[in-house]
Image (cartoon, rainbow, N blue to C red):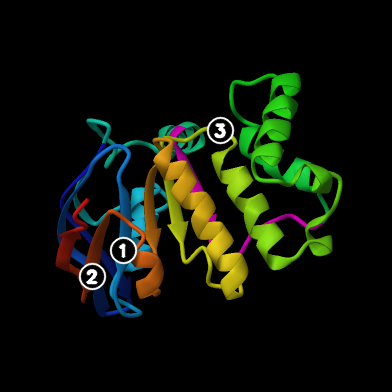
Amino acid sequence: MIELQQLTKRHRAGDVETTALDAIDLHIEAGEYLAVTGPSGCGKSTLLGLLGLLDRPTSGRYLLEGEDVTQHPERQLAAIRRGRIGFVFQSFNLVDEMTVAANVQLALRYGPLPEKAQRLRVAEVLERLGLSHRAAHHPSQLSGGQQQRVAIARAIAARPALLLADEPTGNLDSAHGSEVMRLLRELNDEGTTLVMVTHSAEHAALASRTVRLLDGRVLVDATVAA
């Protein structure tokens, strides 16, 4: 599904250049559950941003389902993000002025579904995540765990093939964190490709494969035996 070839990302501030990712080669199969680990500043979030087409590499190639997306214009990248990639972040990024249902529907607003079909999809996703009774509530009326479930509902509303999660349990207590990890595992079991950045060794152990980064390079690439 994903092929990274010598993918490099450098940041420049004045005369100082910093390498966030250094010639990464990485292959991710469709349906895989990959955990990306490593110390702060090693390039984990940079890698996720590149995978999600939120940023562009300095050099190298990114093939998504066989398509080289490295040089695509922003409008084309936005269309790919809307249809094929879902995001779950540590901060929930919900709009408090909007209801739970409206927050989830945001993911469908610029897609091909008509309004009625969007509402049906939102209801379906909220039911799946046990949030139907919260559809008319606002985020501030929910617990942290419920807010993250809303964020996951929004991420999967368009049925993306690729789900990217950046420290998805970072703002949650252990009970709510475990609930979120269970949901992510269920989505992966159903065929969604999942790439998760995490500092938690316990959560990384739930993945079928772990990549550990250090100084922008792949230090370890280990597959868990079935």
Residue at point 69%, 19% (across, down): 114
Mark 2 — residue?
213
**Disc nearer the start of the sequence (1/3):** 1
Q: Quadrant of the N terminus?
A: top left
In screen coordinates, is 192 left or right of 215?
Answer: right
Q: Is residue 198 visible?
A: no
Is 173 placed above or below 23 here?
below
Residue 126 sits in quarter: top right
Mark 1 — residue?
36
Is 41 placed above or below 217 here?
below
Q: Is residue 185 visible?
A: yes
Q: Which mark is residue 158?
A: 3
Q: Amino acid at mark 3?
A: Ala
For the residue labelled by badge 1, is the local secondary structure a helix, a strand or a loop?
strand
Q: Of 89 and 191, which appears nearest the observer? A: 191
Q: Of 79 and 3, which appears nearest the observer? A: 3
153 in magenta: no
Q: Amino acid at mark 1?
A: Val
Q: Position of residue 201 (x, y in %)?
A: 35, 74
Q: Position of residue 184 (x, y in %)?
A: 48, 51
